[in-house]
Amino acid sequence: MLKITNLCARFEEKEILKGLNLNIKPGEIHVLLGPNGSGKSTLGRVILGDDKYEVTDGSIVFKGENLEALDPAQRAQKGFFLSFQSPPEIDGVSVRSFLFAAKKSIDPDFTSSFKFKKGLKSTFESLRLPEDFTERETNLGFSGGERKKMEVASLLALDPDLAFLDEIDSGVDIDTIRSIGRAIGNFMTPEKAIILVTHSDKLLQEITPTHVHIFMDGKIIKSGGKEMTAEIQTKGFDSYKPQREGLRVIK
Ligand code: ADP
Ligand code: MG
């Protein structure tokens, strides 16, 4: 489904992705674990085609097609979804209108607003969001947990083939993590795939990854199965890189 080969990308003069390889087949759930600032969110942006980042080498092939010439809207139409780490507020646009417009733009055949409203209602119920939430302005005044649920609701509404979920569980309470985990489980089928970036093992108790990767300094340095999450919990990321000097107080 996705084949990334030797991907190198930079933001202005800063090299962020430094030769990344990743292969994903339908039915797989890949977890990226790595320290802050290692380039995980940048990877999501680059797969989406955010033009703030310049791809300097390598290729991204999605469903057999090199994405190079496609803009972000075309990549979304092809079935790629990226959740926002910090979802933007959209004044004056209700959640329902926003999601319906997004749905129609990736699937022009989808025109039934009645069917959409019905689907959204059950999605919101499963995420334990009140029904009138659909009429609120998108992300405006939403709590941290509500924003994350809104991202999950977008995932379920748009129903992509490959979802890159960037810290979709950060800063939310344990019950919310459980409902997010269950919703992602409902989304997943043998035809779909997920890339999950997370810092907490709580979501990983809800979702069992097929692959776990350690992401450091712009590339994947080690890959394994779900047993690797326990290894990282005990060893930490530092053990995978050359030792650095400890923190010192600045005098
Ligand atoms: P992660 O998601 O692993 O924490 P990021 O991909 O967000 O890491 O960032 C990797 C590095 O690239 C960081 O040093 C970050 O500051 C820098 N970076 C990424 N995107 C931008 C941007 N739009 N503007 C400035 N710096 C950026
Ligand atoms: Mg990030």
Image (tube, helix red, strand yellow):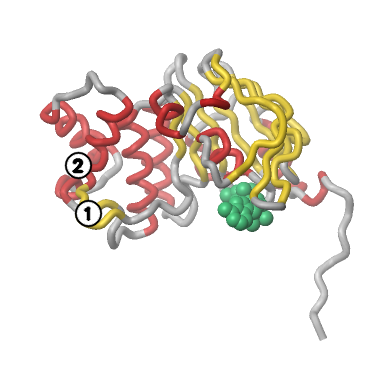
Which of the image's four quarters has the C terminus?
bottom right
Seen from this angle, which residue lies furthest bottom? 251
Seen from this angle, which residue lies furthest front? 69
Seen from this angle, which residue lies furthest left? 114
Numbered label tally? 2
Callout 2: 10 Å neighbours few (<14), some, many (20+)? some
Callout 1: 10 Å neighbours few (<14), some, many (20+)? some
* Residue 14 point in image, percent of width and height: 71, 52
* Residue 185 point in image, percent of width and height: 42, 29
| Numbered mark located on residue 34 in the image | none
Q: Circle 1 sits in a helix, a strand or a loop, which is it?
A: strand
Image quadrant in which you'd find residue 8: top right
Badge 1 amino acid: Glu
Q: Is mark 2 within 8 Å of ligand 1?
A: no
The residue that appears at 51% across and 43% down in the rendered structure is 166
Is residue 87 visible in the rendered image? The answer is: yes
As drawn, 2 above or below 83: above
The residue that appears at 42% across and 18% down in the rendered structure is 189
Sequence-first disc among 2 and 1? 2
Mark 2 → mark 1, Cα distance in angstroms:
9 Å
Residue marked by disc 1: 137
Is residue 36 visible in the rendered image? The answer is: no
As drawn, 177 above or below 104: below
- Towards the viewer: 250 or 228: 250
Relative placement, left or right, of 59 versus 249 is left
* Residue 117 point in image, percent of width and height: 15, 34
| Numbered mark located on residue 97 in the image | 2
- Towards the viewer: 207 or 55: 55
